[in-house]
């Protein structure tokens, strides 16, 4: 939506034009252009060496469109305290216009030309062409005095109807009021003219305009809003010498922060209590970051001082501080950052005062940077040490995973407790197995031989060590109770109901549940499906260790089978004499038991009734023990199934 404010002297009206009507000027999206001219460009005019030269007016570059009327106002009269046009005319001063040629000469303006018109203190070029661009000189002189100043004119071609060239920049505080005057309107050589105001807001096309109004030739903004910050264009049409001319001026309106509120600067960095650590001998960089609210016609200042002296005053090449860098601009409220660089920081500079200062016309804010020498941390050494430690830990972990069994055996041999010194057991291990040909051969030729001969354990095998004629139940309980380990060889026939192997298993499990020192170890000679195991063995499997025989792979004594089996056996920390004494003691005990059994047999008639009662009592106790064992195992199994 394009809004057009039209004023025709002496009446005015506001016209709302739709996009279907082609306005004199297409108001599209604007691009802000800020052109700057050097502050002073001095030149020498040879025709009058006594004329005071004010150089070139640098505050504003006169820019007009090709084909439109161009107005050059003499800047000498911009300061009435120095020069006044009415007084100069009454005092005999004459205003003349010249053009600075490419040969650095002053060419007088021929006012007899139809395209040149002098009206009071302004020179009109109507219409302007591209050849009219250049430097123009206005000279105010009489016989005794002379003053001159240059004005730069730039004639730009219009790049279509949508081209908007900015002529002036205006800043208006938010929520403030301002009146926009069409530039050069006061110099129009005819009082009868027409002024039309345009503006566009491409982002929000339906903006309210009740805070803006055209009054006379001016556009009044009663309350500045953020969305009012757009370029405004005034189109002026007038008649001169029987012809109609027009010119276009565009004013870029920029919204700035409100004049109300705190306008004092604020230091954001360095912060209170912050300590900067520095390394002696290295370069130091300190940041000064400050927030400075907008103030009209004021340049904010941020600088560093060292012992109340600026970097320029110190004149020390080790201290450098470039110009402040703009970090943020929020409606003119700027955040600036200025860096102080110190090369080869020395210990003496730890005692100097580095102060950041920000200043405007409303106040001054300072903040001191607190410096502290950085404590040396041997990061390289620590990193290398940590890396070596991690590498060693990883290596040890890998070695442990590979040689885990060997490490456990070595630890047991050094720090393990010999159970023979703490109990009165006679055997290290009792082997329970099924009485079939293959499994019995494995026990007798391999398992027993390695445990007794190679590893030095005292082994009890019922079929070998029991006394003929004894009671099976009594002898089984006796041998199991006198052993430190119960080695159960698991097979399809190892735990069949009513067999010796099942009796040995139940006796071992009952001893474990009573808290005795006996431990049950399972050896799987051949793979057996667990569904074929007896109930007692299936329920106790979770609490028992299972060592698998892997055929020929397990035959060498260095195989994992024998190492795992050794871990389950009692610790053997004995000398040769101790072992010999223990062996002799074992054979002596066996001989004594055999003699005692023969003696009891000869006098069996004398003890018959008492022995029968004793056997009946032991069998009853064993039966109760087995029932208790089965009940406990059922409880463990039920708990495991629930879990």
Image: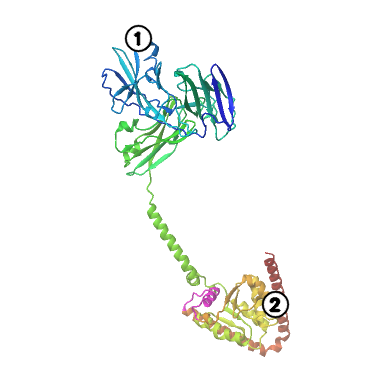
- Bin the neighbour count of mark 1 within 10 Å (Cα to Cα): few under 14, some 14-19, many 20 and up: few
Q: Disc number at residue 622? A: 2
Front position in the image: 215 or 428: 215
* x and y percentages locating residue 171 in the rendered image: 48, 27
Residue that numbered label 1 is attached to? 91
Front position in the image: 366 or 5: 5
Q: Is residue 256 visible?
A: no
Q: Residue furthest bottom?
A: 602
Disc 1 element: loop
Q: Is residue 571 magenta?
A: yes
Q: Residue furthest top?
A: 90
Q: Residue furthest front?
A: 242
Q: Which residues are magenta?
A: 556-575
Report the quarter where the N terminus lies: top right
* x and y percentages locating residue 15 in the rendered image: 58, 25
Q: Disc number at residue 613? A: none
Q: Quadrant of residue 503?
A: bottom right
> From the viewer's perspective, is residue 111 above or below residue 510?
above
Q: Earlier in the sequence, mark 2 or mark 1?
A: 1
- Bin the neighbour count of mark 2 within 10 Å (Cα to Cα): few under 14, some 14-19, many 20 and up: some
Front position in the image: 503 or 53: 53
Instruction: Say left or right for 281 vs 163.
Output: left
> From the viewer's perspective, is residue 89 above or below residue 434?
above
How far is mark 2 from mark 1, CA to CA? 146 Å
């Amino acid at each position: 939506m394009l809004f057009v404010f039209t004023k025709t002297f002496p009446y005015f009206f506001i016209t709302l034009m739709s996009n279907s009507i082609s306005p004199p000027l297409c108001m599209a999206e604007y691009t802000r252009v800020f052109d700057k001219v050097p502050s002073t460009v001095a030149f020498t005019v040879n025709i009058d060496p006594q004329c005071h030269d004010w150089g070139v007016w640098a505050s504003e570059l006169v820019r007009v469109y090709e084909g439109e009327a161009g107005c050059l106002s003499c800047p000498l009269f911009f300061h009435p305290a120095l020069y006044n046009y009415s007084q100069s005319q009454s005092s005999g001063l004459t205003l003349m216009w010249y053009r600075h040629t490419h040969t650095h000469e002053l060419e007088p303006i021929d006012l007899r030309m139809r395209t040149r018109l002098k009206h009071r203190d302004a020179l009109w070029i109507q219409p302007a062409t591209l050849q009219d661009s250049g430097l123009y000189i206005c000279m105010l002189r009489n016989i005794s005095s002379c003053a001159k100043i240059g004005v730069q004119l730039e004639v730009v071609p219009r790049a279509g109807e949508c081209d908007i060239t900015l002529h002036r920049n205006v800043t208006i505080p938010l929520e403030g009021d301002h009146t926009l005057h069409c530039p050069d309107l006061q110099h129009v050589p005819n009082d009868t003219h027409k002024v039309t105001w345009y503006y566009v807001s491409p982002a929000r096309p339906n903006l309210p305009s009740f805070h803006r109004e055209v009054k006379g030739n001016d556009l009044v903004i009663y309350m500045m809003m953020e969305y009012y910050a757009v370029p405004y264009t005034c189109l002026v049409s007038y008649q001169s010498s029987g012809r109609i001319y027009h010119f276009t001026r565009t004013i870029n309106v920029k919204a700035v922060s409100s004049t109300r509120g705190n306008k004092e600067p604020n230091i954001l960095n360095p912060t209170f209590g912050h300590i900067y650590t520095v390394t002696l001998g290295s370069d130091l960089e300190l940041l000064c970051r400050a927030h400075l609210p907008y103030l009209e016609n004021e340049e904010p200042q941020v600088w560093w001082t060292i012992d109340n002296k600026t970097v320029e005053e110190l004149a020390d090449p080790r201290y450098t501080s470039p110009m402040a860098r703009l970090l943020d601009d929020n409606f003119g409220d700027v955040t600036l950052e200025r860096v102080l660089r110190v090369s080869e920081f020395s210990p003496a500079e730890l005692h100097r005062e580095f102060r950041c200062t920000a200043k405007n016309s409303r106040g001054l804010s300072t903040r001191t940077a607190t410096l502290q020498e950085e404590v040396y941390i041997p990061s390289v050494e620590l990193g290398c040490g940590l890396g070596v430690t991690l590498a060693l830990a990883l290596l040890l972990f890998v070695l442990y995973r590979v040689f885990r069994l060997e490490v456990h055996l070595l630890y047991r041999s050094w720090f393990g407790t010999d159970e023979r010194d703490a109990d009165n057991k006679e055997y290290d291990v009792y082997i329970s197995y099924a009485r079939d040909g293959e499994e019995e051969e494995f026990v007798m030729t391999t398992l027993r031989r390695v445990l007794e001969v190679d590893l030095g354990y005292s082994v009890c095998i019922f079929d070998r060590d029991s006394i003929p004629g004894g009671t099976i139940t009594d002898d089984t309980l006796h041998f199991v109770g006198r052993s430190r380990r119960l080695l159960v060889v698991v097979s399809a026939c190892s735990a069949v109901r009513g067999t010796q192997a099942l009796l040995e298993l139940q006796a071992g499990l009952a001893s474990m549940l009573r808290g005795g020192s006996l431990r049950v170890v399972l050896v799987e000679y051949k793979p057996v499906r667990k569904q074929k195991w007896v109930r007692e063995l299936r329920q106790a499997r979770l609490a028992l260790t299972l060592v698998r025989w892997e055929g020929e792979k397990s035959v060498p004594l260095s195989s994992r089978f024998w190492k795992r089996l050794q871990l389950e056996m009692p610790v053997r920390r004995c000398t040769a004499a101790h072992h010999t004494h223990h062996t002799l003691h074992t054979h002596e005990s066996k001989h004594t038991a055999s003699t005692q059994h023969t003696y009891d047999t000869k006098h069996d008639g004398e003890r018959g009734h008492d022995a029968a009662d004793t056997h009946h009592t032991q069998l009853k106790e064993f039966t109760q023990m087995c029932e208790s064992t089965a009940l406990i195992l059922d409880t463990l199994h039920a708990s495991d199934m629930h879990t």
